[in-house]
Image: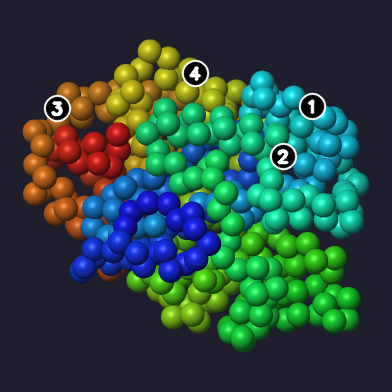
C-alpha cells in the first residue's frame, strides 16, 4: 500500500500489502501553517517527495504528514488566540501566505503570551471537532496549490488526521516503556526521560498541561511505528537532540529507525527561523512566480529537485542562489530532451542501487546521479515516476 495514512487505527497500515515487499513509514517534520514556505521548507519537502516516490518503487510506503496532530502545540494555538484577540472575526480567504506570516512574526515578537485557560477552548475544538482556524486553513489551501504545481504528493494537508493515541494514553505508553518522568501529581511538567542513555531530560508537557511538538509526535508515532519494517525520520539539523530521543523511544518498541538530517538553506549567508521574518522575496510563492514564469511544468519540477537535492545536498553551506537554480532548470531541459525511451525493467534496478543497507531510497545519491557527466540520460519512466 503506497499512500497517506489518514485513519486513526494503525491496523490500516497492514491492509493491502503486497507479499515480499518491505513496509516503510516516512515521517518528516511537519511545518505549521502559520508562515510562508521558504527555501528551507521546500528543500525538506522535495527530499521527502523524492524519497517517497522512489522508495514506493521497491516497498510499501506510508507517508505520514499530519498538520492536525501539531495544531495542539502552543505556538499554533497561541497564534490563533492572538489573531482572534487582536484582529477579531476577519476574512482570511483572500490573504497571501506572506500576509499571514507577517501576523505570525508580530505574534512571536510580543512578550506576553496567552495563558492555559485562554488556549483550552482552542485545544478542545481541535481535539473534539478537528477545527482549524481560518488563517491556518487559508495557508494550507495555498500550500496545496504549491504542491500541485511542483508535482509533490499531497499527504493530506487539508485532511483531518488525528493521532491514534490520546494525550493521557501516550504518557502511559511512555511510562510503560520507561521513558517518562511525570511530575503532574505535584504540579510539575511531564518529561521525556532517556537519561539512562546519557541523554538530557526533555519537557514535553508543561505544568499547565500544554504539549509541545514532541508530545504530539509521540501520540502519532508510538502506535504506528511497530507496524513497519523501517521508520524514516526527516528533520532539520537544529532538532538533532530531540530526534535522538525519538529514535531511542521508537527503538524500544522494536522499530528500526533511520534518521535523515537536513541543513537549512541560508539566505545571503544567514540562517534564520521563519518566525523572525526575513523571508520577504524568498518565499516559495515568490520563487515560483519568478523562475516558474513561462517555464515548462516538467522542467520546473525536475529542475527544482536537481537544485534542492543534488546541488544543495544535506548540508547548509551554500546560500540560496537563483542563478544556480536557473542552471538546474537548464540541466533539466537537457535531461528531458535527451531522455531515453521507457525501460520499465531498468527502473527498479536503478532505484535499488541507492538503498544500501536500508529500505528507503536515498534521494541525494539517486538525484546526484542525474547530474553525473558521461553517464547515459535516465529513462523517461524513471523521471516520470520519481521527479515529475
Q: Secondary structure at mark 3?
A: helix
Q: Residue furthest top?
A: 294
Foreground: disc 1 or disc 4: 1
Q: Label 2, on which residue?
A: 133
What's the CA distance linking mark 3 and mark 4? Answer: 27 Å
Gap in angstroms between the C-alphas marked 1 and 3: 52 Å
Q: Residue at x 10, y 37 (%)?
A: 342
Point out which mark residue 338 bears.
3
Query: Residue 276: where, in percent of width, then height?
Result: 72, 38
- Would residue 186 appear left or right of 139 to someone viewing this image? right
Q: CA distance from mark 2 to mark 4?
A: 27 Å
Distance (Cα) linking label 1 and label 2: 11 Å
Q: Residues within 10 Å of mark 1 (few under 14, many from 20)?
A: few
In the rendered image, residue 223, in percent from the top left (x then y), is placed at 52, 71
Q: Earlier in the sequence, mark 1 or mark 3?
A: 1
Q: Secondary structure at mark 2?
A: loop
Residue 17 in sight in this render: yes
The location of residue 106, given as percent across then percent down, is: 80, 34
Q: Mark 3 or mark 4: which is in front?
A: 4
Residue at the (82%, 30%) spot, across then down: 89
In-front residue for pair 242/147: 147
Q: Secondary structure at mark 1?
A: loop
Task: Pick the residue in front: 72 or 35.
Answer: 72
Q: Residues within 10 Å of mark 2 (few under 14, many from 20)?
A: some
Label 4: element kind: helix
Q: Which residue is found at the position 30% from the left and 34% from the top?
A: 388
Report the residue marked by disc 4: 289
Give the Cα distance between marks 3 and 2. Answer: 47 Å
Mark in front: 3 vs 2: 2
Check if mark 2's residue and mark 4's residue have beta carbons within 8 Å.
no
Of callouts 2 and 4, the N-terminal one: 2
Amino acid at each position: 500500500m503506497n499512500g497517506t495514512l489518514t485513519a486513526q487505527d494503525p491496523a490500516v497500515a497492514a491492509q493491502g500489502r503486497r507479499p515480499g515487499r518491505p513496509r516503510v513509514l516516512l515521517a518528516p517534520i511537519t511545518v505549521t501553517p502559520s508562515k510562508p514556505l521558504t527555501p528551507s521548507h521546500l528543500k525538506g519537502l522535495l527530499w521527502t517527495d523524492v524519497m517517497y516516490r522512489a522508495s514506493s518503487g521497491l516497498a510499501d510506503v506510508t507517508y505520514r504528514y499530519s498538520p492536525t496532530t501539531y495544531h495542539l502545540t502552543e505556538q499554533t494555538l497561541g497564534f490563533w488566540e492572538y489573531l482572534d484577540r487582536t484582529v477579531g472575526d476577519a476574512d482570511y480567504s483572500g490573504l497571501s501566505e506572506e500576509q499571514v506570516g507577517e501576523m505570525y512574526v508580530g505574534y512571536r515578537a510580543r512578550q506576553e503570551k496567552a495563558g492555559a485557560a485562554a488556549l483550552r477552548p482552542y485545544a478542545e475544538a481541535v481535539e473534539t471537532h478537528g477545527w482549524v482556524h481560518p488563517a491556518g486553513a487559508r495557508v494550507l489551501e495555498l500550500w496545496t496549490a504549491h504542491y500541485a504545481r511542483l508535482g509533490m504528493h499531497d499527504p493530506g494537508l487539508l485532511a483531518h488526521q488525528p493521532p491514534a493515541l490520546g494525550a493521557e494514553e501516550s504518557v502511559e505508553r511512555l511510562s510503560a516503556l520507561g521513558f517518562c518522568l511525570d511530575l503532574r501529581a505535584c504540579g510539575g511538567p511531564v518529561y521525556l526521560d532517556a537519561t539512562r542513555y546519557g541523554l538530557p531530560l526533555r519537557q514535553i508537557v508543561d505544568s499547565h498541561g500544554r504539549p509541545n511538538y514532541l508530545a504530539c509526535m509521540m501520540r502519532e508515532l508510538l502506535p504506528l511505528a511497530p507496524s513497519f519494517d523501517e521508520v524514516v525520520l526527516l528533520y532539520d539539523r537544529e532538532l538533532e537532540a530531540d530526534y535522538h530521543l525519538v529514535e531511542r523511544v521508537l527503538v524500544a518498541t522494536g522499530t528500526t529507525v533511520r534518521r535523515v538530517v537536513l541543513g537549512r538553506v541560508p539566505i545571503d549567508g544567514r540562517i534564520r527561523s521563519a518566525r523572525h521574518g526575513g523571508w520577504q522575496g524568498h518565499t516559495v510563492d515568490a520563487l515560483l512566480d519568478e523562475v516558474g514564469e513561462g517555464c515548462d511544468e516538467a522542467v520546473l519540477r525536475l529542475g527544482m529537485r536537481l537544485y534542492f537535492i543534488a546541488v544543495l545536498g544535506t548540508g547548509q553551506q551554500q546560500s540560496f542562489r537563483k542563478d544556480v537554480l536557473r542552471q538546474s532548470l537548464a540541466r533539466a531541459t537537457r535531461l528531458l530532451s535527451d531522455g531515453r525511451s521507457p525501460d520499465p525493467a531498468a527502473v527498479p534496478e536503478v532505484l535499488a542501487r541507492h538503498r544500501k543497507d536500508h529500505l528507503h531510497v536515498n534521494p541525494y545519491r539517486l538525484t546526484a546521479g542525474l547530474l553525473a557527466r558521461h553517464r547515459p540520460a535516465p529513462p523517461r519512466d524513471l523521471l516520470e515516476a520519481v521527479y515529475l
